């Protein structure tokens, strides 16, 4: 069993940073919450509704950004986003694609094939894809991996805007320095168990690092 009796509630509009060492079960938890895989036991509720009852309209309100961009390299940036915009049922697709590409600083790369992009550019395009349907809930799985300074600045700006607009955000990372400035709450997952969950203001990076190392048995 990867996860052990994890009980976690995120209030609407809050930003939760979920920390933990590699292999802690963070990605599995995110995939369950994002409705990508079903839990073997327990229940996921989104907006007060059981995930099992979630219709397509609810699923469209969820955005996901992973360290694996899952883009089509042989397609252009615009073709990638237009394809996903159709899947999400986005209206006025051309306009919306232009909006999100401008937000992540890739408007100039509209006709360029994704296989020619740097790692940072690909991650910025993946962020743009997650924004297409104006999600009310955003899940991010190690989104900082391999980012160049420009992509990092774009991601931080997007997260700050979404937080201000009341988007519910769950960001998972093993890096204690990333994502904490914007977080309202922090949770720590170790060996499949939730060992800490509390307000961001109650901890600083140094005390959190000490706690993290103690819980992980020195493997953090």
Image: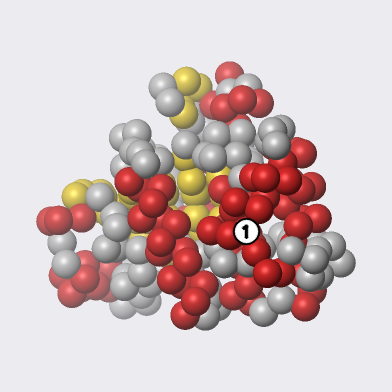
In the picture, residue 34 is in which quadrant?
A: top right
**Residue at point 72% right, 41% down?**
93
Locate the C terminus and report the quarter of the image it occupies: bottom left
Residue 207, given in percent of the width and then of the height, sits at 16, 70
Q: Nearer the viewer, residue 216 or 176?
A: 176
Q: Secondary structure at mark 1?
A: helix
In the picture, residue 7 is in which quadrant?
A: top left
**Residue at point 61% right, 25% down?**
57
Q: Residue furthest right?
A: 74
**Residue at point 43% right, 26% down?**
47
How many C-alpha atoms fall within 10 Å of the one at disc 1: few (<14), some, or many (≥20)? many
Q: Is residue 58 visible?
A: yes
In the picture, residue 37 is in which quadrant?
A: top right
Q: Is residue 149 above or below residue 166?
A: below
Q: Nearer the viewer, residue 22 or 158?
A: 158
Which residue does the numbered mark 1 point to in the structure image?
A: 101
Q: Is residue 189 visible?
A: no
- How many numbered marks appear? 1
Q: Residue furthest left?
A: 202
Q: Is residue 120 above or below residue 123?
A: below
Q: Is residue 20 left or right of residue 116?
A: left
Residue 8, given in percent of the width and then of the height, sits at 35, 39
Residue 185, given in percent of the width and then of the height, sits at 26, 50
Q: Nearer the viewer, residue 111 or 183?
A: 111
**Residue at point 74% right, 64% down?**
110
Colour basis: secondary structure
Q: Is residue 199 left or right of residue 39?
A: left
Q: Nearer the viewer, residue 176 or 155?
A: 155
């Amino acid at each position: 069993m990867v996860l052990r009796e994890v009980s976690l509630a995120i209030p609407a509009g809050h930003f939760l940073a979920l920390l933990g060492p590699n292999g802690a079960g963070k990605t599995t938890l995110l995939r369950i919450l994002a409705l990508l895989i079903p839990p073997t036991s327990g229940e996921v509720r989104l907006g007060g509704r059981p995930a099992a009852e979630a219709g397509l309209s609810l699923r469209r309100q969820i955005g996901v950004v992973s360290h694996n961009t899952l883009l089509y390299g042989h397609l252009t940036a615009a073709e990638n986003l237009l394809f996903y915009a159709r899947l999400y049922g986005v209206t006025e697709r051309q306009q919306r694609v232009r909006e999100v590409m401008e937000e992540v600083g890739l408007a100039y790369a509209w006709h360029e094939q994704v296989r020619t992009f740097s790692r940072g550019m690909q991650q910025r395009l993946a962020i743009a894809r997650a924004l297409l349907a104006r999600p009310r809930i955003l899940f991010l799985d190690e989104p900082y991996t391999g980012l160049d300074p420009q992509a990092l600045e774009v991601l931080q700006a997007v997260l700050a805007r979404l937080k201000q607009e009341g988007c519910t955000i769950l960001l998972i990372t093993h890096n204690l320095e990333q994502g904490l400035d914007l977080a309202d709450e922090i949770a720590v997952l170790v060996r499949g168990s939730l060992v800490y969950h509390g307000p961001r203001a109650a901890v600083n990076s140094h005390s959190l690092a000490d706690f993290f190392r103690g819980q992980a048995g020195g493997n953090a």
